[in-house]
Amino acid sequence: MARLSQRMVSLGTARSEIREAFAFAQARAAEVGPDKVDDFSIGNPSVPAPPTVAETIHRLVDEIDPVALHGYTPAQGAPDVRQALAEDLNRRYGTYYDKDSLYLTVGAAASLCCCLSAMGCPGDEFITFAPYFPEYKVFVESAGGTLIPVPANLEDFQIDFTAFEAALSPSTKAVIINTPNNPTGVVYSKATVEKLGQVLESKSREYGHAIYLISDEPYREISYTAEPLPWVPSYYDNTLVCYSYSKSLSLPGQRIGYVLVPRTVEEFDLVYAAIAGAGRALGYVCAPALFQLVAARCAGQTADISVYKESRDLLLDGLRGMGYTCAQPDGAFYLFPRTPEPDAKAFCERAKKYDLVLVPGDSFGCPGHVRISYCVPTEQIRRALPKFKKLAEEYGL
Ligand code: PLP
């Protein structure tokens, strides 16, 4: 038998409900035709990248010497790209970042891994809030830490501060938040972010060490609130931001994003060095050079995310009208309604009878709910509503 890391073998072979649901949808589509199957299982953006992305790529290919264009950049990313991205943030959030606060990576996943590996020491605990992106557990454990999920606040999926304070301990190294959220679509209010900052400040003082806040923000621009989203580092100095262009520019396959380490972070130089060290140790150096330039030139723009709002309204109004209960989803492209029976897996099995493919909340640490990824053509939502209705009727809603 091959002498391999048992942990890696089990990670590589573990079943994933999301992947299984997606595979089921693909198999059914091949069997009965794609127009009969309504797959809401995965979070792949359904709107194309804005035309400016393709135009920029053409221009870069035409204008820049190919050796330079496709060559290595410094490990942390090209300085002019990092400066351009910092200035874009400054324009939008009234901040004063510069290139030395940014470390470019292959998407938010790599950004998270860099942050966690940079700070993870044996015995460290990392808190997050259920429901949460399932990869957090994998990333935290790979960094040698333990993930401590705080039970969900089922009312509105804002933070339950009593449960949060009970989870904090001197072993807490960092807290991971994700707003707008996958899987709920919920956006943290200003009051939530403000209070979170206050609690972390007071607990850092009490424990005598910084508790970092890792703000995972791949959906930052996809929000439907009238007010702009709170900029998390303005509410807590020891915040690190993990960002990617996967969702805002619809470029998930191009793998481009960054870690932002604001200068307000305690011992900024050491923290940035540790992020760079983690990037080196994990092999996340020199993010894709062409897409570094695309990000710099297209920063501040987005794909046509108005389509998601139209889909959100259609689906949310439709489901609520049928009697489903769903917390207000003001961002990302997910809904997380309560299932009409406590067993969400059984509900998803019933939905499959209608070729309606959903993911049980258990996958996100929150049973009794179901994730609906509505980043699909709006037409699919119209077609699927009668299926949701039939399901509701089965449960007597
Ligand atoms: N964090 C959350 C909450 C996500 O939903 C995703 C992807 O779906 C990621 C991180 C990873 O994003 P990326 O494609 O930028 O690695």
Image (spheres, rainbow, N blue to C red):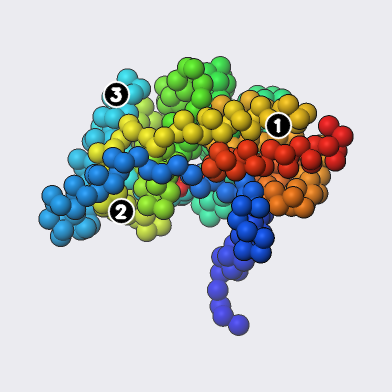
User: Distance from label 1 to label 2 (Cα)?
Assistant: 41 Å
Residue 213, above or below 229: below
Q: Nearer the viewer, mark 3 or mark 1?
A: 1
Quadrant location, the C terminus: top right
Q: Which residue is mark 3?
A: 91
Residue matched to label 2: 288
Residue occupied by mark 1: 319
Is label 1's Cβ within 8 Å of ligand 1?
no
Could you tell me residue 78's position as x and y percent?
Answer: 22, 46
- Indicate the secondary structure of the residue bearing disc 2: loop
Query: Where is the N terminus found, in terms of image quarters?
Result: bottom right
Q: Tell me which numbered mark, 1 or 2, is placed earlier along the sequence.
A: 2
Q: Earlier in the sequence, mark 2 or mark 3?
A: 3
Residue 153 or 146: which is nearer the viewer?
A: 153
Question: Tag 1's secondary structure?
Answer: helix
Mark 2 vs mark 3, CA separation in Å: 25 Å
Indicate which disc, 3 or 1, sits on the residue closer to the N terminus.
Answer: 3
Residue 359 position, x and y percent, is 67, 47
Outermost residue, right side? 396
Give the side of residue 28 with respect to residue 203, left or right.
right
* Residue type, label 2: Pro
Q: What's the residue at 39%, 31% (across, down)?
A: 265
Tell me how many marks there are. 3
Q: Residue at x 79, y 46 (%)?
A: 347
